[in-house]
Image (spheres, rainbow, N blue to C red):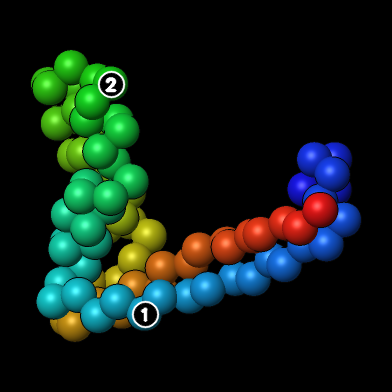
Amino acid sequence: MQELGHAEQHVRLQVYPYLLPLRDHLVEWYRGAALTTYAKQLPSDRFQQFVAEFRDEVAARFPDASPFFFPFRRLLMVGYR
């Protein structure tokens, strides 16, 4: 932000705790948020394949817990001139 002329900056990491019923609900959570851009840009069959591969990746990386705790991290920034 310095290169944009913002001499003062405020940056913070905000963690939103989500308690989902199952690990598989994480895929649907992302599907309704971050994956909407992919859904618009990919043909329907390719998007379905992408979601299936994403589901497999989630299953490989996260424990199968019920309820499933998901700490969603977001970086928030504001700059002042």
Tag 1 residue: 17
Q: Quadrant of residue 72?
A: bottom left
Residue at 19% in and 82% down = 67
Asked whether, in this view, residue 7 is left or right of residue 60, the answer is right
Give x and y (percent) for residue 4: 80, 40
Q: Quadrant of residue 71?
A: bottom left
Q: Is residue 32 above or below residue 62?
A: above
The extreme front residue here reads 81
Give x and y (percent) for residue 25: 16, 63
Instruction: Give amino acid for label 2.
Output: Gln
Q: Is residue 46 above or below residue 39?
A: above
Residue at 28% in and 21% down = 41
**Badge 1 density bin: few <14, some 14–19, many ≥20, Cα 10 Å:** few
Tag 2 residue: 41
Residue 55 visible, this angle: no
Residue at 17% in and 81% down = 66
Give x and y (percent) for residue 43: 18, 17
Residue 20 visible, this angle: yes
Instruction: Give amino acid for label 1.
Output: Pro
Whichever of labels 2 and 1 marks the residue nearer the N terminus, that label is 1
